[in-house]
DNA sequence: AAGTGGTCTAGACCACATA
DNA sequence: ATGTGGTCTAGACCACTTT
């Protein structure tokens, strides 16, 4: 259905008329609907290329997208196979508690318990790529999932976003969403460190658990498209309230494991 | 330096003469060595193509590799930038405690505490894609890191690998390595679920911690290149002994978060 | 032997960022 | 206006799996 003579696409935003995303989306639908069940073989690249009247390169980009999502696997010489059926979540849902919760049909809420400016610790300055001693905005926030206390968030916001965060109402639903809408500050990259630790007294009081009971901790730094760090956060979840999930293949391993803390 | 008229490469295994891996490796070295510091711009694609006398497509494949590793980021219209400097670990290190530990210069050990055949539970049959009631090999194993009890591993091996695992010595260092060498069974895909939970009495005794103290749990299924599940494992780490790390970008998010257990 | 994915080329148009 | 990355094409050789 492409009448243009060569190359070029990309209209509007999102998954508009980008050819390979169109093909990927169609295949994804077939997998999620069960038309292509787990273990099934995908059509060959040449098949798909002919069917969509696209070049093989474009088809390869489409299947590479699905492979990155962990939906399909491949080995040289053999047909591609369907590995799993679940849908992957979007990027925003990883960096944003609210986006994640709402994507799953839960109600997310949050309340600022304190917002104070103070000099960055050595680690905060390091994570946020700021000069030592720069004043950051330190925030303590309790997050609720369907009304239940679920997570305690301790975030250091870089100096250049501090004012925007201070201006938000105390019961702001999503800081990242508000920053995007209000100031055009959008997170493009994230790095996440996940471990377990016992609840401290403040954690225990806020999450309504016993001191020393297990918490799942996710520390993460979010950065703009230009690589500029926005926030460095220490989020602690009640045990049992959340599970992290990672897929990997021998060609691409996004996760790593480290000894000790750090 | 490529005198052949067109296409084709791939000699031997590994990163032999594959052009894009060669280019990626060179760039990776420059990043790790600090020649290209965090925040620096990469040369343009055309620069790299000329410098390596390769086509732009090949260069793009090289930088895509580094982007998948989380080392560099990109935005349309602007030069690529260096995001981080740390080296990523290999796939095997995620599925294998021993490979991971040794990659970091630590000594790994393990001891089978029990190996028994029994019918699979519903969940085990499901995770291993076996018919309900198929007999699996259930293994309890204590893992040591530099002599310290670090992790308790409870694994269900699929029926078709059970014999190979039973044949291993009780102090086998790495089951996955042994399976690869002895039987040619290699893991290509993995899915991992990460959460926190309190230590049970068996956990506490083996890991030498108090009952109820926090553990970091990693449940994972490993599968062959053909997508056939090999093992389904529940690994529990002492809090503080290990941290998981994930990078993401708005184009590729390998990690997801889930409500509740499951 | 045939089919399939993995790698590579050379050229093109477009959207976006920056100067 | 220029440069840069993002997308696309059409054809090629190779390594590997399967028949």
Image: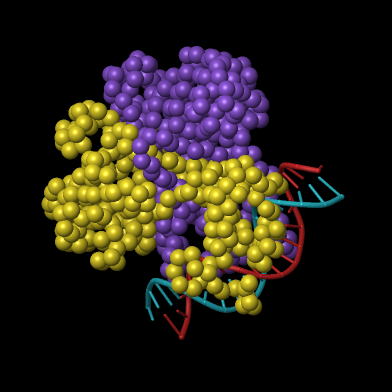
Chain colours: A yellow, B purple, C cyan, D red
Which of these two is toward me, B23 or A4?
A4
Residue B199 in the image, given as x and y percentages of width and height = 33, 22
The residue at 32%/47% (across/down) is A106
Residue B154 in the image, given as x and y percentages of width and height = 46, 22
Q: Is B160 located above or below residue A253 in the figure? A: above
Q: Is A121 located above or below residue B161 in the figure? A: below
Residue B192 visible in the snapshot: yes
Q: Is D13 located above or below residue B223 in the figure? A: below
Q: In which quarter of the image is residue A153?
A: top left
Q: In this view, does A142 lie to the left or right of A32?
A: left
Position of the N terminus of chain A, as image quadrant, is: bottom right
Residue B7 in the image, given as x and y percentages of width and height = 70, 60
Residue B27 in the image, given as x and y percentages of width and height = 50, 55
Residue B61 visible in the snapshot: no
The residue at 41%/45% (across/down) is B256
Position of the C terminus of chain A, as image quadrant, is: top left
Which of these two is toward me, B116 or A148?
A148
The residue at 29%/49% (across/down) is A107
The residue at 70%/46% (across/down) is A78
Which of these two is toward me, A77 or D19?
D19
């Amino acid at each position: 259905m492409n009448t243009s003579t060569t190359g070029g696409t990309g209209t509007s935003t999102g998954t508009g008329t980008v050819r390979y995303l169109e093909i990927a989306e169609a295949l994804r639908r077939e997998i999620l609907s069960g038309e292509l069940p787990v273990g099934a073989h995908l059509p060959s690249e040449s098949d798909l290329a002919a069917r969509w009247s696209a070049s093989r390169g474009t088809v390869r980009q489409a299947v590479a997208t699905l492979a990155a999502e962990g939906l399909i696997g491949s080995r040289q010489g053999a047909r591609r196979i369907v590995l799993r059926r679940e849908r992957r979540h979007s990027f925003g849902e990883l960096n944003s508690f609210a986006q994640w919760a709402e994507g799953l049909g839960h109600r997310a809420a949050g309340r600022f318990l304190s917002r104070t400016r103070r000099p960055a610790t050595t680690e905060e300055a390091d994570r946020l790529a700021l000069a030592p001693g720069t004043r950051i905005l330190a925030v303590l926030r309790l997050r609720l999932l369907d009304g239940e206390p679920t997570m305690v968030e301790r975030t250091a916001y870089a100096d250049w976003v501090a004012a925007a965060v201070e201006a938000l109402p105390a019961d702001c639903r999503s800081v990242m969403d508000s920053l995007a809408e209000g100031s055009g500050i959008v997170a493009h990259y994230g790095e996440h460190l996940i471990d377990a630790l016992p609840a401290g007294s403040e954690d225990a009081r806020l999450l309504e658990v016993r001191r020393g009971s297990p918490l799942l901790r996710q520390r993460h730094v979010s950065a703009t498209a230009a690589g500029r760090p926005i926030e460095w956060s220490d989020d602690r979840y009640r045990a049992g309230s959340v599970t992290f999930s990672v897929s990997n293949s021998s060609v691409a391993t996004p996760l790593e494991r480290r000894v000790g803390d750090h």
